């Protein structure tokens, strides 16, 4: 049984006010107020939601803030909403191991591809030369015959050496080109995964919840004058208790006026298009 919930419910019934009327006045979902009166705080989205809703409710009922908030902190600590702790050393080891394996795979693919291409070229050159060998001056030594539509004379030793040297140079150039291309691909991949920096500024007290790339990263009560910064890769989603109390800065672009004063807004979906920050309501 929740002492906090009983206190709020008793005061509401004393004022002869229906819970639905409170939800409509405060613009808070009825099921959240029912959960608060029943002490079922885990049914709310986050600790910031609990804190903001309880504070709004006690002000509506004109209860003593210190007494009510003391009960709130006893029955609804922040740890109630914290995810289970993960072994940090194991997490770091797995990340390093994953990055190392990925690097080794790329390196091995490059090496095996280069070796395969090298032997393929050598095989082609071998087949080409062995099928065009002819005897010269009754000598048992064979030399490659270079076909020429304008001349029927066999090549001399100097031309054979030059052709072989050119083949070796061409092979080295191909291998170097493959290495350069792979380096460009790695650089392009790094650029694509570069994160984007966001700065949040606040002008009034309100609760805030930010999901970054589908993970809850920020969950707090904002105070006037504070700022928060974070990075994201693809998108972020903001829930806020006062839509007029925030401005968002990205790459010298400032977005504000997301709603009316004291208006709660949820699921504002932000992403980048043509290097500009845009948002929609999901």
Image (cartoon, rainbow, N blue to C red):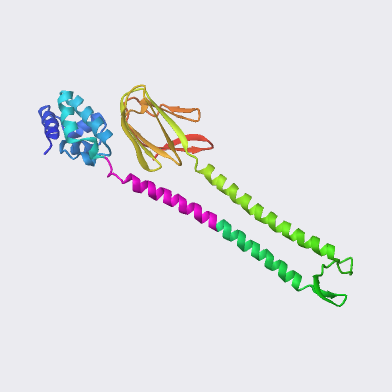
Magenta residues: mostly which secondary structure? helix
Question: Quadrant of the rendered structure where residue 130 is?
Answer: bottom right
Q: Verify whether residue 107 appears in magenta.
A: yes
Establish if 80 lies above or below 177: above
Of residue 69 and residue 282, the one placed in the foreground of this image is 69
- Which residue corresponds to the image point at 62% horizontal and 52% vertical from the top-left? 179
Of residue 35 and residue 131, the one placed in the foreground of this image is 131
- Which residue corresponds to the image point at 82% horizontal and 70% vertical from the top-left? 145
Establish if 256 lies above or below 128: above
Q: Is residue 77 left or right of residue 199?
A: left
Of residue 88 and residue 30, the one placed in the foreground of this image is 88
Q: Position of residue 274 (x, y in %)?
A: 54, 37
Question: Quadrant of the rendered structure where residue 198 is?
Answer: top left
Q: Is residue 12 left or right of residue 140?
A: left
Quadrant housing the C terminus: top left
Q: Position of residue 46 (x, y in %)?
A: 27, 37
Q: Verify whether residue 115 appears in magenta.
A: no
Q: Position of residue 11 (x, y in %)?
A: 12, 28
- Which residue corresponds to the image point at 54% horizontal and 42% vertical from the top-left? 191
Q: Is residue 116 left or right of residue 145?
A: left
Question: Quadrant of the rendered structure where residue 154 is?
Answer: bottom right
Q: Is residue 177 left or right of residue 102?
A: right
Q: Which span is picked out in magenta?
A: 82-108
- Which residue corresponds to the image point at 45% horizontal and 50% vertical from the top-left? 99
Q: Position of residue 37 (x, y in %)?
A: 16, 36
């Amino acid at each position: 049984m929740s002492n906090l919930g009983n206190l709020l419910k008793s005061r509401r019934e004393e004022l002869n006010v229906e819970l639905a009327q409170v939800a409509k006045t405060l613009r808070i979902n009825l099921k959240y107020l029912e959960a608060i009166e029943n002490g079922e705080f885990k049914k709310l989205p986050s600790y910031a939601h609990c804190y903001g809703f309880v504070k709004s409710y006690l002000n509506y009922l004109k209860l003593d803030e210190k007494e009510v908030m003391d009960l709130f902190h006893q029955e609804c600590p922040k740890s109630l909403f914290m995810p289970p702790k993960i072994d940090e050393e194991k997490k770091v080891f797995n990340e390093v191991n994953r990055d190392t394996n990925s690097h080794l795979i790329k390196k091995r693919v490059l090496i095996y591809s280069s070796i395969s291409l090298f032997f393929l070229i050598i095989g082609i050159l071998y087949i080409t030369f062995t099928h065009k060998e002819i005897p010269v001056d009754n000598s048992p030594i064979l030399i490659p015959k270079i076909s020429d539509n304008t001349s029927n004379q066999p090549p001399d030793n100097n031309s054979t050496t030059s052709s072989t040297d050119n083949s070796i140079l061409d092979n080295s150039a191909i291998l170097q080109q493959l290495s350069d291309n792979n380096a460009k691909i790695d650089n392009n991949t790094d650029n694509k995964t570069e994160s984007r920096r966001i700065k949040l500024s606040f002008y009034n007290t309100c609760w805030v919840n930010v999901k970054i790339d589908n993970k809850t990263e920020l969950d707090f009560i904002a105070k006037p004058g504070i700022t928060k910064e974070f990075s994201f890769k693809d998108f972020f989603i903001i829930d806020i208790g006062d839509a007029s109390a925030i401005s968002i800065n990205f790459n010298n672009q400032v977005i504000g006026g997301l709603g009316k004063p004291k208006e709660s807004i949820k699921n504002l979906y932000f992403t980048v298009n043509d290097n500009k920050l845009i948002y929609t309501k999901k």
